[in-house]
Image (cartoon, grey):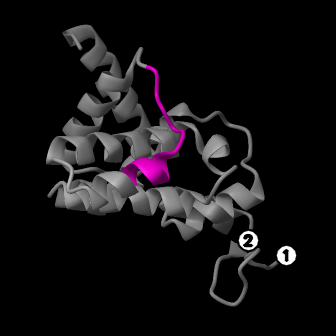
Amino acid sequence: MNGTTLGIASDFVKAGIDKAGIPLSTTLEAYLSITFARFIGRHVTVDLLTVRVTRALDGDAPRDVLRALADECLIACAFFEQRLRRSGTVRHYVGLGQMSYDAASLTEQAYGFVHMRDVMASAAEGDQPEDAPLLLDRARAGSTTARAELEQQNVVLGPWTRTSGLVWR
């Protein structure tokens, strides 16, 4: 990672913060910029994330291994949602990332995982409307941007149904 890469990553994160309307603490903003910079130009392995995280947690892996897995979960949840959804829900992978950050004693990152994911995804997404099942999955994972978009479509997410929100039209 060099200064140029970090600058690109920092600008990307700031654009995501502006687009999502989610303020991050200076710690989370810096962490997210550095994490994204580390992944620029690198092959991201999203396969078998559940297995790799479980093995690391069961094997008392060192903190840096747990942090790296949590970072992979974050990047995967932000950029490779469709691929992850083939084998689980976004909520599942968000939980894996939060659990991995927590196990690595990165409490602020664990609690801020959903907001960091929203910032990254917002910076990367276009202006076309999102697929309703994907929005519902994101909203159930705690995404404030997904909940806001559902609200604009008059969809209320609640505990009364598992497959869709309550639609008011």
Residue 110 in view in this figure: yes
- x and y percent of residue 29 in the render? 25, 41
The range drawn in magenta is 43-53
Q: How many marks?
A: 2
Q: Amino acid at mark 2?
A: Asn
Residue drawn at the location 67% of the way across and 43% of the way down:
82
Q: Which residue is mark 1?
A: 169
Residue hosting label 2? 154
Magenta span contains residue 157: no
For label 2, count other residues whose C-alpha is less than 10 Å away and answer few (under 14), some (14-19) or many (20+). Answer: some
Q: Position of residue 153 (x, y in %)?
A: 74, 64
Q: Which mark is residue 3?
A: none
Q: Is residue 95 left or right of residue 85?
A: left
- Compared to residue 125, the image places residue 131 above or below, namely below
In three-dimensional space, the C-alpha distance between marks 1 and 2, rounded to whole angstroms, equals 7 Å
Q: Quadrant of the N terminus?
A: top left
